[in-house]
Amino acid sequence: MQKTWWKEAVVYQIYPRSFNDSNGDGIGDLSGIIEKIDYLHLLGVDVIWLSPIFQSPNDDNGYDVSDYCAIMNEFGTMQQFDQLLAAVHQKGMKLILDLVPNHSSDEHEWFQQSRQSKNNPYRDYYYWQAEPPSNWVSFFSGSAWEYDELSQEYYLHLFSKKQPDLNWENPKVRQEMYNIMHFWFQKGIDGFRIDVFPFISKQLDFPNIDPNQFEKTVVEVYANGPRLQEFVQELNKEVLAKYDVLTMGEGIGIKPSRALEFVGEEAKGLNMLYHFDHVTINYGSGGKYDPVPWKLSSFKQIFADWDAAVGEDGWINIVLDNHDFPRMVSRFGEDKKYRKKSAKLLAILLLTLRGIPCIYQGSEIGMTNVLFNTLEEYDDVEVKNLHQEWLKKGKDTQALLKAVQIQGRDNARTPFQWDATPNAGFTKGKPWLPINPNYPQINAEEALNDPESIFHFYKDLLAYRKANKTLIYGKFELLLPASEQLFVYRRWDAEQRYLVLLNFSEEEITIPSDVPLEDYLQVKGNYDKVGTRDVLRSWEGRVMCAKRKITH
Ligand code: TEU
Ligand code: CA
C-alpha cells in the first residue's frame, strides 16, 4: 500500500453560509472564513472543505449552481477567494471545493439556452421528454419531471425543480465539467468533494420505481447507472491524473461490493467516497421523515462491512454528520446530561476508525440539534416542499414538525456558535437562520478556555493520530459485534496495536473477559480519572495501546 498525504488527512467541512459573517448581512462569507483560519489551524485539521461557494440563486444553498467559475455574491469576490486560498496554504493546510456535477441551477446559462427550443444547441445538456417517461420522484417531494412552458416538454430533476439534471451522456457536458475542474485546479485548489456522483449516469429507459421503497430505488435506479464507472474513469484521465489532489465522492447508493470500482488503487477513479448506510440507519418505511429506532449492532456492522470491502485497496471517509443530517451528538450520542462525554466518545470513533475523517463545523464544540417550534421557521427547501405536500394531502403537519425536529437538515445548519455575545458572535446583523438558543453555554470561546472541553479533546486526539500512524493505516477488526452497548475494535500494523472501547449507553458495562484488556494501557479517554479496568462508565470511551509490540 502506498502512503500519501491525503490518506493521512483529516477534513474539516465548512458550510460557508453558517460559519462566520464578516459584514453584518447575516450570511457567512469568505472573509469570515479567513478570520477563523487560526482557529482551524489550532484544532489541527489538514484539509478544509467548503460546501458550494459558486454563483447560485440558493434554492438549495449553493447546491444549485448558476456559474461554476464565479463566486456567490453573498460570499464575496474572486479576489477574496484567492486571499482565502493563500491564507490556508500559508498555514500548511489544503482547501477543497464542492463540485456539483449532477445538476445545475435552472438559472444557469446552459439551462436558459436549453429551454429556448427543441433544437437549441444546449438542448441535450439536460434530459427532456415529451411526456414524463416514468414515476420518478424528487428527493424534495413530487415528480422528478417538471413541465417547462417555454419549450413544452418535461425535464428531469432528482432534487428541486430549480436543479435540472445534467445529461452526462453528452460529451460536451462532460467537457464543460472538466474545463471547470481545470479552472479551479489551475488556481491552486487541492481537490473536490463531488456531490452525488453516483447519479451522473442514468438508466436511459427511466424504469418505474416503487415509491415506497426509496432505499431500493436509490441503489437500483437513481445511482449506479450503466456508464458510472466509465464516466468516473474518464474524469480521472482527463483531469485528476494531471494533479496531486484529493477527491471525495459523496457515495449515496453505492454498496460496499461496488466501492473498489471507484476508489480502488487499480480503478483510477476517485480517492475516496463516503458511505451512507449508517446516516440513513433510522429511516423508516416512509423514509427520512419517518424515523425509527436503530440498533448499535447494525450501526457497527455497517462500518465493519465497509472496512472489509475496501480494506487496503481503497479509501473511504468517516462521516458522522454533515450539513444534510442531524448533529452527531444529538443523534448517536446524548445531548443533555452526557453531551460532553458522548461528544468525546464520538470524536474517538470518528478519529480512530480506518478512513479519512470529516469533522463537520461545530461538532468539535459539541453543537446540538435545534428545536424550532413551527415548520415556518425551517428554511430548508426539503422541508418547505414537504410542508406544502402534507398540507395538500391533508396530513397532520404537527407530526411532520416532530419528525423534522429530529431529522431536519437545518439542525446542522444553524450558525456556528463562536461566543456568548448576541447572535453567538456569528453576525452583527440578523442571522439568515436563527441561532440555537443554547449558544451562551455551547460556544467556541467557552471551549477554548476550558482545558477539558470537547474542542481540546479533538485537538489532542488529532495530534495523537498524526503521531501514531497505526491509527491511520492499521487494520481494523470489530470485537463483540452483537453487543448493543459496546463498540469495541482493534487497530494494528507491524508497529503497534490499539484497542478502542466505547460505551454507547448510560449504563455501567462490564467488559466481557474475552477482550484482552491485560495487554493494553489506556492512552486516551473521555473521563479525567482512569476507572476500573474492566468496567466502562456512562458513555465512557478509551483508546488503549499495547504494552508490548505486536508479535503476529
Ligand atoms: O446530498 C445528496 C444526498 O444524497 C442526501 O444526503 C440528500 O441531501 C438528502 O437525502 C436529502 O434528504 C447532496 C448535498 O449534500 C445536499 O445538500 C444537496 O441538497 C443535494 O446533494 C443536491 O445537490
Ligand atoms: Ca456576510
Image (cartoon, rainbow, N blue to C red):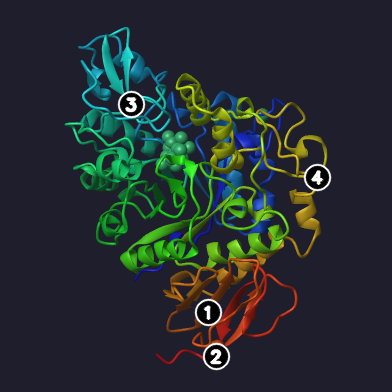
The residue identified by callout 3 is 144
Question: Quick one: which residue is furthest to the left in this view?
Answer: 205
Type of amino acid at the residue the image marks with label 3: Ala
* Cα–Cα span, label 3 and label 4: 43 Å
Type of amino acid at the residue the image marks with label 1: Leu
* Cα–Cα span, label 3 and label 2: 57 Å
- Mark 3 or 4 closer to N-term? 3
Q: Which mark is residue 499?
A: 1
* Cα–Cα span, label 4 and label 1: 37 Å
Q: In front here: 337 or 497?
A: 337
- Residue 187 seen by the camera: no
Tell me the quadrant of the picture where the C terminus can be found: bottom left
Check whether the beta carbons of the residues at disc 4 and disc 1 lie within 8 A of each other: no
The x, y position of residue 92, in whole percent, is: 58, 55
At 33% across and 34% down in the image, what residue appears? 177
348 above or below 208? Answer: below
At 33% across and 26% down in the image, what residue appears? 144
- In what element is the residue under mark 2? helix
- Residue 152 seen by the camera: yes
* Cα–Cα span, label 1 and label 3: 47 Å
Foreground label between 1 and 3:
3
Does residue 281 appear to the left or right of 505 in the view shown? left
The quadrant of the picture showing ligand 2 is top right
The x, y position of residue 174, in whole percent, is: 27, 34
At 29% across and 30% down in the image, what residue appears? 136
The residue identified by callout 2 is 519
